[in-house]
Image: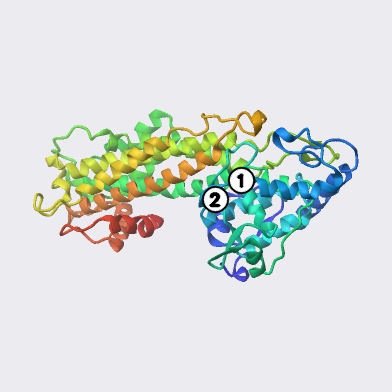
């Protein structure tokens, strides 16, 4: 955990969270606190909930059952037990636990949503969520179980169990019972009251949390992919003519022009480009080089759409029902995940294209079929005796094959739940999980391109590439040496992913 005294806390004041703020809490343990104005809003909303408990009216999830059981009225003496039963019964997830950073991001989004004062929980509920974040108590949340319609019910239920002193949680590197984890952090279990279990479980907090982290990851990956492309251009002694700004202005696609500018700036001043500007027998390069700005630009545009949807969700209240300033308690469908599910499906498509075009450039570099490139087959020092980098292209191809499957949307396949009351679900959490896996695979493919392109650039020494490419080449070489003899390549790829990509 970060030292709370060294980092300015993130203030939950009812306003929007930024993606960077989510990353700072989820990955870097930034402390969090609730603003005074937010506490007043929370308390006022709670007073409105308590006022409606004796009005004799049916209020969904407050004095009724849930889902298809909503027509069942619950007596006032059982309202607290109703909420406890809800949390326990909905903690039905299965599979590997979600990573710590995702659970922390989910808890942050839940606390931020409740702090906006429309959910009707007591201030103590939000305070305890923040205390769990600051105390390093991370619920063990199974990764499978949410259909992304009535919020992320099962994952949030597993988190809420720990709030109640049940379930399991990780603290200080150990997995303990929920009660013991709270005790380790100096916290006590919380007894839920009317409406609070429902408020903790309703909401798109898991899928939006994963979306925020993925948006941050995509931006980093995109810039690494542009670097890899630029390095491959010089590695294959391809032309930079297709990066001419006038071409991209004529296309009227700003993201394409942006991608071209990024690659062009990385190659600026390249001696390799100048060395074959005249008398090069090739007329045009393959699409994976020549059309890279169009493909990368389209992926950047798609990610921009995803980022906008996520940023909106980071300012949202996705509970049901909501309580408003005039005392009205209104049921609706703000918890439905489709506004996030479709963008997350799109993100997997964008990631598949970033990886697939990189794999095609790897294939070209290793094929050794273009004499003008000056490259030996598979970049081996002694082709035939040595296989060089032959098999990393197989690995990239395997990644791309899986990416193609991941690009199939989750959000278009509907399976009804709750006896038909919840008859159109988003499956946004599945879209988020697919996009997370897609990002992992795409990083491997880009790392493989960097491995190959660095070796190809070395084949043209003493000529130097542009300053941006040379900087990236030095980063790759700081973690992976030149290939002078055949060696196992798995660790090379892993080191580039872990140590080089974050620096590009």
| Tag 2 secondary structure | strand
Vertical order, 415 against 159 (above or below): above
Task: Determine which residue is flagged by label 1.
Answer: 154
Percent coordinates x, y for residue 475 in the rendering? 32, 59
Percent coordinates x, y for residue 79 in the rendering? 81, 47
Percent coordinates x, y for residue 113 in the rendering? 69, 47
Q: Say whether marks 2 and 1 touch (CB < 8 Å).
A: yes
Q: Is residue 42 left or right of residue 454?
A: right
Q: Quadrant of the N terminus?
A: bottom right
Residue 117 visible here: no
Q: Is residue 380 left or right of residue 33?
A: left
The one nearer the camera, 308 or 145, is: 145
Residue at x-position 14% and y-position 39%: 369
Residue 87 visible here: yes
Could you say which disc has been placed on residue 142 in the image? Answer: 2
Which image quadrant for residue 161? Answer: bottom right
Q: Residues within 10 Å of mark 1 (few under 14, many from 20)?
A: many
Residue at x-position 63% and y-position 53%: 159
Q: Is residue 187 left or right of residue 206?
A: right
Could you say which disc has been placed on residue 396 in the image? Answer: none
């Amino acid at each position: 955990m970060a030292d709370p005294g060294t980092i300015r806390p993130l203030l939950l004041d009812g306003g929007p969270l930024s993606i960077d703020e989510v990353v700072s809490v989820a990955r870097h343990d930034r402390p969090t606190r609730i603003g005074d104005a937010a506490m007043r809003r929370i308390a006022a909303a709670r007073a409105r909930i308590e006022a409606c408990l004796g009005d004799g009216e049916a209020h969904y999830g407050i004095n009724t059952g849930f889902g298809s059981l909503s027509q069942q009225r619950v007596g006032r003496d059982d309202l607290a037990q109703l909420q406890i039963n809800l949390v326990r019964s909905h903690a039905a997830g299965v599979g590997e636990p979600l990573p710590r950073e995702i659970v922390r991001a989910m808890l942050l989004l839940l606390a931020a949503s409740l702090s906006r004062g429309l959910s009707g929980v007591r201030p103590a509920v939000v305070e305890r969520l923040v205390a769990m974040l600051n105390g390093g108590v991370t619920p063990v949340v199974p990764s499978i179980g949410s259909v992304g319609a009535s919020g992320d019910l099962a994952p949030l239920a597993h988190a809420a169990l720990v709030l109640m002193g049940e379930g399991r949680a990780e603290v200080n590197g150990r997995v303990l019972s929920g009660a013991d984890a709270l005790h380790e952090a100096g916290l006590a279990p919380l007894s839920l009251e009317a409406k609070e279990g429902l408020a903790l479980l309703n909401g798109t907090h898991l899928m939006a949390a994963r979306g925020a982290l993925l948006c941050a990851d995509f931006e980093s990956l995109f810039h690494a992919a542009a670097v890899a492309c630029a390095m491959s251009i010089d590695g294959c002694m391809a032309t930079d003519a297709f990066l001419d700004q006038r071409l991209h202005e004529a296309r009227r696609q700003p993201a394409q022009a942006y991608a071209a500018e990024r690659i062009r700036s990385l190659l600026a001043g390249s001696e390799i480009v100048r060395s074959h500007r005249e008398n090069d027998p090739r007329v045009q390069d393959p699409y994976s080089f020549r059309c890279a700005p169009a493909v990368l630009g389209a992926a950047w545009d798609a990610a921009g759409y995803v980022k906008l949807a996520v940023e909106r969700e980071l300012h949202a209240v996705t509970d049901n029902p909501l309580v408003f300033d005039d005392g009205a308690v209104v049921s609706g469908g703000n918890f439905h995940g489709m506004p996030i599910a479709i963008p997350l499906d799109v993100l997997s498509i964008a990631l598949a294209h970033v990886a697939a075009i990189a794999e095609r450039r790897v294939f070209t570099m290793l094929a050794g079929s273009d004499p003008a490139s000056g490259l030996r087959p598979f970049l081996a020092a002694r082709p035939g005796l040595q296989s060089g980098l032959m098999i990393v292209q197989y690995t990239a191809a395997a990644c791309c094959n899986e990416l193609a499957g991941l690009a199939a949307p989750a959000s278009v396949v509907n399976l009804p739940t709750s006896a038909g009351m919840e008859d159109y679900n988003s499956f946004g959490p599945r879209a988020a999980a697919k996009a997370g896996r897609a990002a992992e695979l795409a990083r491997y493919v880009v790392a493989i391109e960097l491995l190959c392109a660095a070796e190809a650039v070395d084949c043209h020494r003493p000529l130097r590439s542009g300053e941006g490419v040379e900087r990236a080449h030095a980063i790759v070489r700081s973690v992976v040496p030149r290939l002078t003899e055949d060696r196992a390549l798995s660790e090379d790829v892993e080191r580039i992913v872990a140590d080089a990509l974050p620096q590009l």
